[in-house]
Image: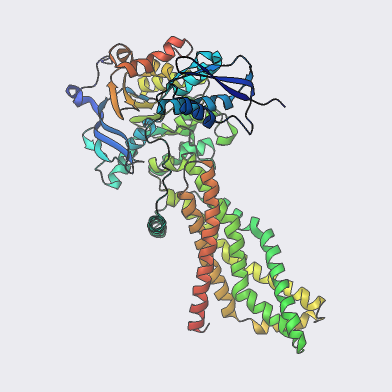
């Protein structure tokens, strides 16, 4: 696999997501400007950076929850930014999103949470939907929890259930917002393993927002570093390469955990 | 109690030595920076050193004092020699100075002139108004989808909401309606008894309850009870990103969350209003029979002859309109909710205020409308 090369215009034929001159802003307050990068098919692409740098905001731009101040986001060769609302909905259907807090609908059981998008977009019978929901729950290690409400299970389980829901429609692209936030090291490593297995078996493209170094080194095939000081991206490439070639800030960011020994990559 | 002390010594070469003594704990009457400033200025000194031999204890008070002294010295080009300070103090000062103040991080404290503030306040009312109309517009579109059978929400959700807004509200509606009927009867009885027209208490209570009070009191109870709960529910769903999850799944949060709440209130309010009519009249009857010694049969006949069907229908019609307004207020404030737990509280408060403003405004409009139409 060509995981060691940084994304470049030459590999555009494989480009799954292209970010072009993207500037993000809340009103007149610019968060990040001039973002340019490509996420290729089958990548596990990590968006990293310090707290408050706009990682999650970038993710919200990918899934249409925020509008760019300028620039555009392309899926394949089609612009998402310029798409009509109806077309956008169609494109969104191919995405799965795992939110930071899981964001399971609290009035529904886990099976109903997973079944809702299925009922919305397929003509499966309720029995079939239930079966698929059970399968997805089994995949994330929550077999038998179909009739639990989100409030009845632990935070780590909510995350995994959220992942099961994100996978409900067998998406091409999975977005993860801080998957390991609030999880203990073991749960968060299990989640990382799960992410890798999913990519292997489903061939999905995966975009992860995180600042967890262990995760970054364990799963990323490519990454972008958002620098909070200069308000733009300062590095692009696989994290292991950035450890050598990145600028000071990036290297410090990536080394810090490793030298502490407690968060270091295995 | 021992207090912090500060004294000064001048040594040659233009150095001022500040002697810090005693326990420096946060309290009133701390030695002030001004005394240091006076000493330095009076002697035109170029260097400041510290002696802490008699310092027994210290906390943040010493640090803030030293930071202020340091700032003064920087401004007046006085060198500060910190070697005389305890090691811990030196380390903490270094830590506090390690990261330079971020430009623009400090909130501006310059108050604009009052005319500008008034202007800003007026301009700020524009966006919420626009948002409100946009929200009402999108609800109308959602209702259109509902009419064409294309709006999606879960029927179990609707049934649960109906139960919450209906059966579970009976207790409080009973209490309020009975008391309102009772109070109306009391007020009326005192006046009407003066010229022996006590029987007309039945007319007063019947007409007032059926035409106005039942719908309005129910609406206000429901605005405080159910409207606030809608705002809090939707607000929390925004905070936990559940609304985002719906949006990215291509499910309209208006269809899925707002419509069932609106339908539930719109269905339940007329029923609650009808119930409130009956309970209110019973409250009046309690006064009529207990205080005015009217036989039940007489009170009943008098009420029947006073209240017309059009009164009843008008009241129930109002109630369903109030129901829609409460749902709009609750859902609007919920969907506008910010990203914190205090924002959820604000949303609930604003939902009740907006709901009651809506109800009272509508009540006024209805009063004029019904008068013009002669109902």
Location of residue B217 with respect to B81 vertically, above or below = below
Q: Which corner quadrant holds the C terminus of chain A?
A: top left
- Residue that sits furthest to the left in the current view: A10
Location of residue B300 with respect to A226 vertically, above or below = below
Quadrant of residue A17 in the image? top left
Task: Please name the residue shown 60% across and 56% down the image.
Answer: B225
B225 displayed left or right of B182? left
Q: Where in the figure is residue B332, as x and y percent of width and height?
A: 46, 54
Q: Which corner quadrant holds the N terminus of chain A?
A: top left
Q: Where in the figure is residue B209, as x and y percent of width and height?
A: 64, 74
Q: Where in the figure is residue B66, as x and y percent of width and height?
A: 52, 24
**Is residue B104 shown to the viewer in this render?**
yes
Task: Please name the residue shown 23% across and 27% down the image.
Answer: A15
**Is residue B159 shown to the viewer in this render?**
no
A93 displayed left or right of A150? left
Q: Nearer the viewer, residue A53 or B256?
A: A53
């Amino acid at each position: 696999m060509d995981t060691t090369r940084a994304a470049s215009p030459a590999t555009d034929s494989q480009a799954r997501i292209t970010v072009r001159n993207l500037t993000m802003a809340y009103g007149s307050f610019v968060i990040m400007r001039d973002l340019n990068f490509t996420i290729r098919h089958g990548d596990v692409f990590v968006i990293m950076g310090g707290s408050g740098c706009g990682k999650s905001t970038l993710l919200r731009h990918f899934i249409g929850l925020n509008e760019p101040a300028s620039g555009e986001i392309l899926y394949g060769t089609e612009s998402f930014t310029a798409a009509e609302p109806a077309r956008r909905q169609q494109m969104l259907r191919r995405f799965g999103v795992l939110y930071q807090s899981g964001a399971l609908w609290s009035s529904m059981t886990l099976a109903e949470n997973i079944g809702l998008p299925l009922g919305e977009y397929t003509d499966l019978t309720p029995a079939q939907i239930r079966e698929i929901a059970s399968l997805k729950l089994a995949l994330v290690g929550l077999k038998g929890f179909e009739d639990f409400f989100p409030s009845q299970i632990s935070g780590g389980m909510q995350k995994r259930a959220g992942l099961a829901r994100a996978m409900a429609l067998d998406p091409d692209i999975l977005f993860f917002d801080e998957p390991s936030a609030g999880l203990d090291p073991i749960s968060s490593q299990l989640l990382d393993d799960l992410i890798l297995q999913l990519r292997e078996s489903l061939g999905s493209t995966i975009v992860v927002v995180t600042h967890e170094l262990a995760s970054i080194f364990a799963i990323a095939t490519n990454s972008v570093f958002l620098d909070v000081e200069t308000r733009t991206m300062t590095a692009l490439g696989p994290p292991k390469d950035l450890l050598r070639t990145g600028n000071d800030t990036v290297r410090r960011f990536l080394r810090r955990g490793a030298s502490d020994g407690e968060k270091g990559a295995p | 109690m021992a207090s912090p002390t500060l004294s000064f010594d001048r040594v040659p070469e233009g150095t001022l030595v500040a002697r810090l003594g005693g326990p420096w704990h946060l309290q009133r009457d701390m030695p002030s920076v001004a005394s240091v400033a006076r000493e330095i200025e009076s002697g035109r000194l170029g260097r400041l050193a510290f002696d802490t031999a008699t310092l027994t204890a210290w906390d943040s008070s010493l640090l803030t004092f030293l930071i202020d002294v340091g700032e003064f010295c920087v401004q007046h080009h006085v060198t500060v020699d910190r070697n005389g300070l305890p090691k811990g103090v030196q380390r903490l000062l270094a830590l506090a100075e390690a990261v330079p103040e971020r430009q623009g991080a400090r909130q501006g404290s310059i108050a604009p002139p009052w005319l500008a503030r008034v202007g800003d306040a007026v301009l700020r009312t524009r966006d919420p108004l626009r948002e409100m109309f946009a929200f009402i517009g999108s609800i109308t579109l959602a209702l259109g989808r509902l009419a064409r059978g294309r709006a999606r929400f879960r029927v179990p959700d609707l049934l649960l909401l109906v139960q919450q807004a209906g059966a579970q509200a009976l207790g409080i509606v009973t209490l309020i309606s009975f008391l309102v009927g009772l109070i109306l009867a009391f007020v009326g009885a005192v006046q009407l008894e003066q010229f022996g027209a006590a029987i007309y208490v039945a007319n007063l209570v019947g007409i007032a309850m059926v035409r106005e009070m039942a719908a309005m009191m129910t609406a206000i109870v429901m605005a405080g009870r159910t409207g606030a709960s809608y705002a809090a529910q939707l607000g929390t769903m925004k905070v936990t990103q559940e609304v985002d999850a719906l949006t990215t799944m291509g499910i309209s949060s208006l269809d899925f969350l707002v419509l069932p709440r609106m339908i539930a209130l719109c269905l339940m309010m007329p029923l609650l209003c009808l119930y409130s009519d009956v309970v209110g009249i019973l409250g009046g009857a309690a006064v009529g029979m207990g205080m005015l010694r009217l036989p039940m049969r007489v009170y009943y006949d008098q009420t029947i002859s006073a209240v017309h069907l059009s009164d009843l229908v008008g009241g129930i019609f109002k109630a369903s309109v109030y129901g829609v307004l409460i749902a709009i207020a609750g859902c609007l404030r919920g969907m506008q909710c910010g990203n914190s737990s205090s924002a959820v509280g604000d949303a609930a408060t604003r939902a009740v205020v907006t709901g009651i403003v809506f109800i009272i405004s509508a009540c006024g409009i209805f009063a004029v409308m019904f008068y013009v139409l002669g109902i």
